[in-house]
Image (tube, grey):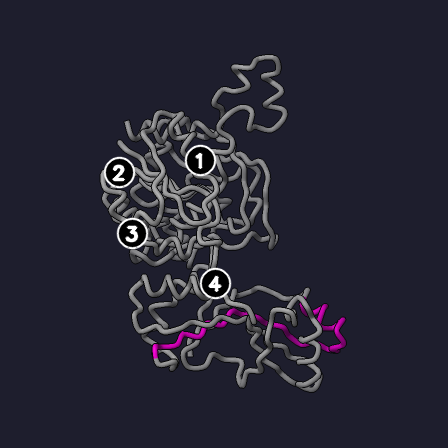
Amino acid sequence: MKTAVIVFPGSNSEEETLRAAQAAGADARLVWWFEGRAALKGFEAFILPGGFAHEDRIRAGAVAARDPIVSAVIDAAQHGAPVLGICNGAQILVETGLVPGTGEAGRPQAALAPNIQGHYLDHFAEIELAVSPERCIFTRHLAAGARIPAWASHGEGRFRFRDERTRERVREERLVVFTYVGGAPNGAEFDCAALTNPTGNVLAVMPHPERAGWRYQQPERVRFEARGDRAAYLAPYGGSHLFSLFAQVLA
Amino acid sequence: MSLVAVAIELKIPDNTAFTAYDALLSMGLDELGDIKRSDVWIVEADALPAEITHAIRRTELIFNPNKHMLRMLNSDRPASGEIWVAVPGRTYERERRLLEQAGLRAVRSVEACTRWLLLDKRGAPCSRAVLERARDLLANPAYQDALIA
């Protein structure tokens, strides 16, 4: 299954994301937004990487969500294609309405609002599987309660839901797939770190697992465990797990 | 007590407005001829309107004379062709303190929003139908309010 990592003007994590996906065994390549809808022909899975698409003008993800290339991703997602959005990619997915996907198609039912602190946050975070692994196609091979390390790096990462009815559906349908261990640092509702859609084929994850995909990208205490062992130091670790799960979905 | 509403506009080209214009055209809003963006500040204080305006002009966090123009508004509500986007519950305590430091006493309230003015190809305000179609790009209903005249 071919995977497109879609690059927007202002994306900045596409290389790490591509590398993590390829290292996990996915047949992935970069596709640029200006290549248009036609460039996605033949791709069956999609990753929207992090960054600042269109400089986050108007609102993070708002302009990219209305880009013609994203309309092809929306069509594919509605037919069950796996779609993973990371950070800015998650913001784009929320703006398309694909997640939580509880309302009218094309209208956002949630937002990634500015952090409660009013400023950018950049720190190591662990996210924990908060639902049964079968809830989302990307997590079905995970153990219950599994944790994945990632780097939180965003100014607009606070999941907010449009109204009580949306909140109720998010709760009832268990759409919050991952929560932050220790509580959301940005004030997100339900401590949400990652949100899926009712059919479980779209995942919008706010912190960056691709920036914690190898041991040398982990906090010092984890890197220290591999002291003197070059192979272990350079080995996949932590965040790479999410990409392995992604590759398993495609297999 | 007076209430003053001002629009703070960029003197330089507004890249965000250009991007919004392009995005709206790509969404099929062919009627659109131009779009202008400004920050609206609504300040209520025990002072004359001129004193409030003077304090706003002296508060660089709101108004930077090197890059901004200040325009007085006739109303604290959107006019024809405008969408005002605000974040409900957001407070402006820092701006209130700075306004007081700029000489304004007894500031009763400070509110702000982003004002989008959509014009058709003849330069006239766009219809409400066009504004409704632009609304979700300019405001996310999950955390922003979009006020249309």
Give the foreground label among 3 and 1. 1
Residue type (three-letter) at the residue carrying disc 3? Ser
Q: Picture coordinates of residue A25 (x, y %)?
A: 35, 25
Label 4 lies in what chain? B
* Front residue (pair B11, B135): B11
**Residue beneath label 2, please?**
A43
Image quadrant of residue A142? top left
| Tags 3 and 1 touching, CB below 8 Å | no
**Residue beneath label 3, please?**
A71
Label 1 lies in what chain? A
Residue type (three-letter) at the residue carrying disc 1? Glu
Residue A242 seen in this snapshot? no
Report the residue at 73% width, 78% height from top: B106
Q: Are marks 4 and 3 on the same chain?
A: no
**Residue beneath label 1, please?**
A15
Q: Are marks 4 and 1 on the same chain?
A: no
Report the residue at 42% width, 46% height from top: A90
**Residue beneath label 4, please?**
B16
Identify the mark nearer the N-term, 3 or 1: 1
Q: Is residue A210 above or below residue B52?
A: above
What kind of element bears circle 2? loop
* Real-space CA distance between mark 2 and mark 1, rounded to the nearest whole angstrom: 18 Å
What kind of element bears circle 4? helix
Identify the mark nearer the N-term, 3 or 2: 2
| Tags 4 and 2 touching, CB below 8 Å | no
